[in-house]
Amino acid sequence: MSVKSFASVALEKDATIRTEVAKAGLFETLRGGLKQVKIDGETYHVAEGDTLLDEDQLRFYAFSREKINDARRAGATADFAGLGTVALAEPLRDALVAVTQGGKIVRWKPGVGLTYRVVKNTFTSAANYALVVDQMKKATDAWEDTCGVDFEHRADLDAAPGVGPAGALFSVRELDTGGAFIAAAFFPNDPVDRRRVIIDPSFYTTGFDKTGVLRHELGHVLGFRHEHIRSNAPPACPDEPLFDTANLTLYDPQSVMHYFCGGLGSRELKITAVDRRGSQMVYGPPLKNMLLIEA
Amino acid sequence: MNDGPSEGGASGASETFARRFLRARPDVRTRVAEDAAYRAWLGQFRRVEIDGTPLYVLGGDLLLDEDQVALEWARRAGMVSEDEVDRAQREE
């Protein structure tokens, strides 16, 4: 005879819980939609890729997911109406934020070379081109010192025609957007034709550390979202997409991924110890710390 | 992503998940387009055009196309459930 899960025991013993959990309409959707597996005679529903839930556990899971989704929507709606809130004394919770898709953390496949070209013909001056080449080197070195990624500047492609990657993984180019942003990048799961780091001319006069700006943008290239989308972040931080994220570490207002807003964040945009831990959860330790053996 | 998972991973896609999702759910696209609150929300963001594609700047440096902002709004407004989006993403 199998041992009952805590969920089953809770449902048996507490009528109030049983009534509350039974209200979750999501339960039927999940029960019909999730894969099922049979292990040692017991049937489990497979949630989030690898979490096996019995039927009673699934009821609790559905109940909590519904409440989380409702809370998110309520928060977004309230924020839109100027009534958003943030706790000032909430205990620190998990941080560096990863992009997810289908419940999985998005990252570059191991072995994908993170090559880039700096598109010379897009820069308004040779000096600006040289500056960006130099700053990109510093920013990529910083990430290579942090976690298991390997960037390569394909300088041989910098003079290639067009503005696309031209054989590299992504391009770095200057584009005047009228100061819509200082720089912008892309996520690993963005369409191929968006694999570009865009440098607005405001980059050259920004009060932010220029290498820090590129460290931040390369964080996006690696699959990290903004730290300040977390519920602990001040409401003054810019409105942005709320979904498809996973928290990797403790909230870190000094994170390289935290905007300088609401009195938090840093103009230096340095990679912190928390960023290091979070990024290593996804990409492992720096490659230079390893002896890599060929097949 | 993607054209379906390849060995150990997905290949780069030529269009966004949001476009594929809304193509399968034209009713959602219509509801969003008709929502005055959506238009008001969208109006606060800078709009830029890069390589011929109009993009909205959210969060300071995140560039979203029209499908992506529409889907973001649909999720915020509860026009689509998270599980529906999750299921669609997993099926890719």
Image (cartoon, coloured by chain):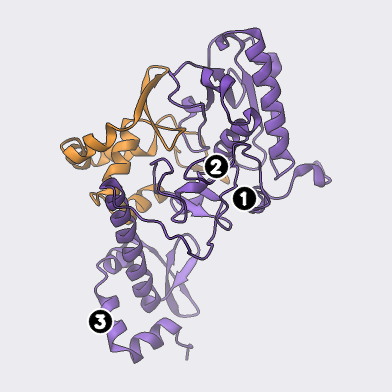
Chain colours: A purple, B orange
Marks 1 and 3 belong to one chain: yes
Front residue of A22 and B60: B60
Q: Is residue A99 visible?
A: no
Residue sitting at x 23%, y 39%? B38
- Callout 3: 10 Å neighbours few (<14), some, many (20+)? few
| Up/down of A10 relative to B34, above or below | below
Marks 1 and 2 belong to one chain: yes
**Relative to residue A79, is residue B28 drawn left or right?**
left
Q: Which of marks 1 and 3 is nearer the N terminus?
A: 3
Residue that numbered label 2 is attached to: A223
| Up/down of A195 relative to B69, above or below | above
Label at residue A282: 1
Residue type at the position of mark 3? Thr
**Relative to residue A8, is residue A186 drawn left or right?**
right
Residue at mark 1 to residue at mark 3: CA–CA distance: 40 Å
Residue sitting at x 43%, y 25%? A180
